[in-house]
Amino acid sequence: MQFDVWAPRATARVTLWLDGTEKAMARTPDRDGWWSVEADAGEGARYGFALDDGVVLPDPRSRRQPDGPDGPSAVVLPDTHVWRHGWAGLDLRHAVLYELHIGTYTPEGTLDAAAARLDELADLGITHVELMPLCPFPGVRGWGYDGVAPWAVHEPYGGPAALKRFVDTAHEHGLGVVLDVVHNHLGPSGNHLPSFGPYFNPARTTPWGAAVNLDAPGSDEVRAYLSGSALAWLRDYRLDGLRLDAVHALVDDRALTFLEELSTDVDALSRELGRPLSLIAESDRCDPRTTTPREAGGIGLHTQWNDDVHHAVHTALTGEAQGYYADFATAPLAALAKTLTHGFFHDGTYSTFRGRAHGRPVDVTRTPAHRFVGYAQTHDQIGNRALGDRLSASLSPGLLACAAVLVLTGPYTPMLFMGEEWGAGTPWQFFTDHTDPELAAAVRDGRRREFAAHGWAESEVPDPQDPATWDRSRLDRSERDREPHARLLAWYRELIALRRAQSDLADPDLAAVKVAYDEQARWLAVRRGDLRIAVNLSPERAAIPLGRGGRVLAAWDEVSAPGPDGLLELPGHSCAVLADF
């Protein structure tokens, strides 16, 4: 087989180290900075590259790191997995996403253990599992956003073979699989890319360190490296899509941006494979151009997370007003109504959190609602709180039911965070397993300082490096069979089934969504075609003007259709979905 590596920083020699033997590599004549050599190697053979007689480093394009990011790479031969299930693909137009962290979803924390639970998600009505990052990182426990080998699978999760088994099982259950990938930075520990070439631009910085080189000399190869990794996930693992972490942190001044190139490449691969492939952006810009088709002057990604939905729902439910919630807290139901009908709350409005105007208006007559992902909870919004507390830690079951109805009957592509569907009582905290003592101490101390500035005592902030922090974050599946969790789980199942059965709930026409609300009485009503959704966030009973008659399709508490006065009598902390006929 042929071993290749892009190593323009090697001045004289590059040597292949393969199972204890060494073999000199030659410069590739027609590829500047590339070196290659032919060598016999079987599945699992350990190898690496030495530059100018230096230490042996893992392959930047390694498909497997069995001994962690600092160990040698292992050969993964193509076509060794026999796929058991054919798969025509599944796009996001009628999706219900489910964000899942492999390490805390099951007690075992492996891909195989998670695969054994996929029948539960299919039964719930989920269409796509969105896996948090799987690339290798130092240690065993972590969120995955400090991965350093973007072509490989974290070995403690089961490695690349386990991911193929997971995807195969998901497809057997009719579930698509989306993978969260990180292109804006790589972890500080175990990152050997700078030894090989200009993968980073030290003149540009992100919150996580030097920016990935997308526009400086050498950036053509860096772009090809990242897009090649993305295409490999979709092609070799039969994934259905990728969630692109923090695309706003991609520093890129070129006329043709990396994201446009990537969306072009993914659309081409989709045509080649004959199945839909999706790119989901995480962006804090509130910019509809992120998902506007390329031919209309946009970037061409297929959908984007919409944090404004989360902020509006969270503020309306909890009353919190600190940080970025401040802009939503002045009139929380008005903010929620605007977000449900206009795409973004911040569409050029002034943001007190940022101290400037933020966002860009969405043309609701031309932008389909499914281009936005709506949610009440995510790993970020839970885990980046001091205690990692979920909504279930402070809200009544009725208010959790209201959160569910706002997301699952709303106009946007809905997404749940694992355990949300039964109101999991376990927190989801920030945990790490850095093997570098200095980095571990810096992360621990930095997090405590951050929350101390917001009034938390340092002793109250969990230590990310303490295994107990990770252990507390693992789901307790026994809760599913106990009240009030069982009732909430049944409610989520009922709402997802309703979304699938009622075409009005999948209508992409954002301009057709109508919302009425009473800020003081704390109720909100949404009209979607022939359906009416009523939410009472007050602990007191509310009389909500929905119009006369109709049929109750789903209700958290027992209610009757509005009488001649057109008022729906809705108990406190409750919600209902009605049809006109």
Image: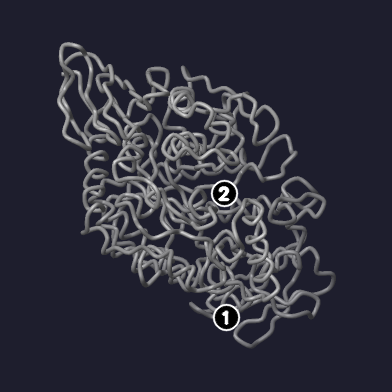
Residue at the extreme top:
564
Residue 303 vertical position relative to residue 109 in the rendered view, above or below: above
* Residue 281 % position (x, y): 54, 42
Label of residue 245 in the image: 2
Residue 492 vertical position relative to residue 228 in the rendered view, above or below: above
- x 65%, y 59%: residue: 186
| N-terminal label among 2 and 1 | 1
* Residue 55 % position (x, y): 74, 80
Q: In screen coordinates, is 541 left or right of 237? A: left
> Residue 500's quadrant in the figure?
top left
Residue 412 vertical position relative to residue 479 in the rendered view, above or below: above
Query: Which three-letter amino acid code belongs to the residue tagged 1?
Result: Arg
Label of residue 333 in the image: none
Nearer to us in this view, 166 or 313? 313
- x 43%, y 70%: residue: 471
Mark nearest the camera among 2 and 1 is 2
* Residue 292 % position (x, y): 54, 28
The 10 Å Cα crowd at callout 2, few under 14, some 14 to 19, many 20 or more, is: many
The 10 Å Cα crowd at callout 1, few under 14, some 14 to 19, many 20 or more, is: many
Task: State how the image is colored.
Answer: one colour
Please state, as top left, top right, bottom left or bottom right, where the N terminus lies in the image.
bottom right
* Residue 13 % position (x, y): 80, 75
Q: Helix, strand or loop at disc 1?
A: strand
Residue at the extreme bottom:
20
Query: Which three-letter amino acid code belongs to the residue tagged 2?
Result: Asp
Where is mark 1, residue-wise?
A: 46
Q: Helix, strand or loop at disc 2?
A: loop
Asked if labels 1 and 2 touch by Cβ distance under 8 angstroms, the answer is no
Q: CA distance from mark 2 to mark 1?
A: 31 Å
Q: In screen coordinates, is 431 left or right of 86? A: right
Residue at the extreme front:
540
